Image (spheres, coloured by chain):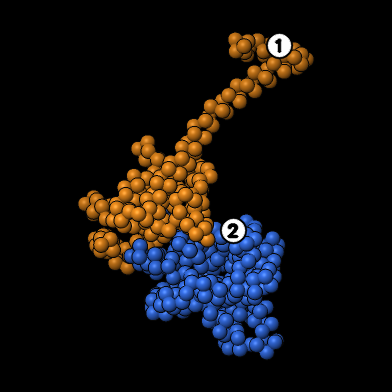
Amino acid sequence: MRRQLLVFSFAVVSIAVSGCARTQNGALGQTEIRDPFESANRRVHDFNVGFRSVIVEPVAKLTPAPILTSVSNVLGNLNSPLIFVNDLAQGRACAAGVTIGRFFVNTTVGLGGLFDVAGTQLGYHGHDNGFGQTLNVWGVVEGPYMVVPFLGPSNARGLVGMTGDFFLDPMDLAFSKAKLGRLNRPRAGGEVLIEQIEAAPQLAKLENTSLDGYAALRSAQMQSEVQARKPPPCPVTPARQESSRAYDVLQINK
Amino acid sequence: MFAKLDFAHEASHATDLFVGGRYVARLVLIYGFIGILACALTSLPARSSSEGARQFVDTSAKQGIQILSNRAASDADRRAQFATVVLAAFDSDGIGRLVVGPAWATATPEQQARFQAVFKRALVNIYLERFFDYDGESLRTFGAAPTANDAMIVTSTVSTPSGSGKHNLEWLVVRRAGQQKILDVTIDGVSTTATTASDYQSVLRATGGNFDRLIGLLDAKNK
């Protein structure tokens, strides 16, 4: 599986380097993404819309909110070491300090991450980070726009980042070393589901007000990638949570 | 004091100027005063216009969001009141022209008029969805900065009623026929007008630039 991902990652990089640059235009400075795989991407987008309405939204409706929050907290806490590594790789010492502080507080006082004590009681809110974001900060070109099954909009750089996260996640490595590697896949699946549940209301709003939901989401995703390059304040407040996902920056009713 | 500013006289006594420290100090004071006055007078309109833009956004946004927060009113009433505020505060014609891009120039005046009529309703729907869950009381506007093309960007933050979500909003304010109008709201880095432009221009590309088709789809979406 890892070898396949590595090969896939190299293929993606090759495509990215093959001249899929972004062009600047538009009265408001909006940029137009080159989308050479548009027809395939649209099919995946349609699949993701179906996945959201058939699986994600019913699960969100049937699961009590406190349970969703707790699961989200635990998974977010397990992601902290990966976020910490990427904070450091981006030279964001303050953000790295907040991340590691949150990890210790939430793991101990927050009962293994069930409760976000650091955020709700101490005001140290979490932020997202990953290798894709690190590549973004390092100035790596985004490459062609790509929609990933289950996960949503991304680009070649984002896919390489996901591969990097897969190999470098300290918690994955720790689980494997402790002979708990079988937990990694359910954890990854849970992360995808929670992420989609949290994003679903915003995605629905974007769909409701657009004629071509695919084009609107692609534009929002591209703008959020540009936004994510700006250094955020530290400690991170909820308003400044970084993410490479368009629907995160479109959060309006969370 | 100003009567003493005789430049010919000052030139003929240049040596005295440099020798007499008191004379130089007086000149520095006079020219400094004039400079400061000129500076203050020229920056006054800019400062007043940026404060005006901030107040305009603060008033309009609070009004709109508070209408949506009023759960006691019926959905239809809230929608109607919100539409009035949006159409008064936003430059819907200007936004309409922007979102269709180059196709605007090729559309007939009759098509343009029909588009603007349906777009007004679409614009209200877009901002209704964007602002629906905001808490009007939490809106804070911080100030305005001029852009290169004489517009103003007003920065603000707003939260959801639970306080769990706090968002950074940037309002692009322009002057239209002497009145301030909002041309765009950027929410956490994502421009609403730019996103709508990508959406509509994608439809135009897919339909070979068929303006009537765009109007038809928009009209159907509004219903």
Q: Tell me the residue at 58%/76% (across/down).
A: A75
Number of other residues with Cα within 10 Å of mark 2, as a class: few under 14, some 14 to 19, many 20 or more: some
Quarter of the image with the N terminus of chain B in it: top right
In the displayed structure, would residue B190 be above or below residue A71?
A: above
Dot 2 corresponds to which residue?
A: A237
Q: Is residue A39 visible?
A: no
* Tally of numbered tags: 2
Q: Quadrant of the C terminus of chain B?
A: bottom left
The kind of residue tagged 2 is: Thr
Quarter residue A133 falls in: bottom right
Q: Which mark is residue B66?
A: none
Q: Report the residue at 69% width, 72% height from top.
A: A108
The disc numbered 2 marks a residue on which chain? A
Q: Amino acid at mark 1?
A: His
Element assignment for label 2: loop
A185 vs B89: above or below: below
Q: Which chain is orange?
A: B
Q: What residue sits right under mark 1 in the picture?
A: B13
Residue at image x 75%, y 14%? B22
Where is residue A78 shown, x and y percent of the image?
Answer: 63, 76
Real-space CA distance between mark 2 and mark 1, rounded to the nearest whole angstrom:
65 Å
Residue lying at the far front of the rendered structure: B72
- Above or below residue A91? Residue B46 is above
